[in-house]
Image: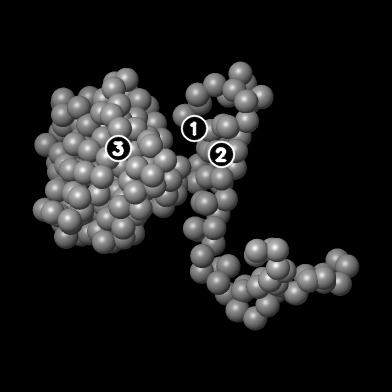
Amino acid sequence: MLGGTLVPFLYQYPNPPGKLTLNRGVAEMLRVFHPLIQQLSRAGWVKHIRENRQNTKIIGQVDELESFMFGSSRNSLSQAVDYLRKLQSDKCFYCSSKLRDAVDVDHFIPWSKYPRDLAHNFVLAHASCNRKKSDMLAAERHLDNWLGRNQRYGLEINDELKGFQADNDCSDRVAFWAYGQGIIVGSFGWVGGKDTEPLTQDCLELFES
């Protein structure tokens, strides 16, 4: 239903009992966009489960709820670790201290906001920093560093992380959208530890520099 009007764009309705015939071209598009549709659906279910207050006592703040519900759905990010260590001079992207053994490849724009593995969206962080950031957008200072890194090393990232979709312009557009939405709803950006700060229009101006 769109605006109270039935628009049968996937299949005609009503359909015969026990039978569903897709409109022309729908099956092909479902095949083409299957990974995106699947990831968006799973992200929506995970969000729904987390926000249900009755589930809080059961799941707490489990970091791997998606894996528990659906199995591991993301590409293996381990192949990006060695390159990101080199790119970041073996330092955590967020706290800048030396990386230890417990490291995570973090989605700079959180997976919950855009469930796609984009090469330019990856940063390497301490597992503890990644957990504290969780699904928050990073503060302005981190955004500035991320944009600068991609501007300087964008082509190199393309070459080194060929197993992932590498499109810096796409990553920028996703980030601009995510921060724009965050500013509209009054979100806070994660600085480090338990520290946060309000997201402001200054974040969007970084994309113009």
Q: Compute the Cα span from label 3 to label 1.
A: 27 Å
Which residue carries the number 3 mark? 199
Crowding near the residue tagged with mark 1, few <14, some 14–19, many ≥20 C-alpha atoms within 10 Å: few
Whole-percent x, y for residue 189 in the image: 31, 33
Residue 197: mark:
none
Tell whether 79 sits left or right of 145.
right
Which label's residue is closer to the chain start, 2 or 1? Answer: 2
Q: Residue at x 59, y 23 (%)?
A: 56
Tell whether 23 sits left or right of 186.
right
In the rendered image, the quadrant that contains the N terminus is bottom right
Which label's residue is closer to the chain start, 2 or 3? Answer: 2
Q: Which callout, 2 or 1, points to the residue nearer the camera?
A: 2
Whole-percent x, y for residue 186 in the image: 38, 37
| Camera sees residue 53 | yes
Residue 112 occupies which quadrant of the picture? Answer: top left
> Do the CB atoms of the residues marked 2 and 1 lie less than 8 Å apart?
no
Name the kind of residue labelled 3 in the image.
Answer: Leu
Which residue carries the number 1 mark? 64
> Do the CB atoms of the residues marked 2 and 3 lie less than 8 Å apart?
no
Which residue carries the number 2 mark? 46
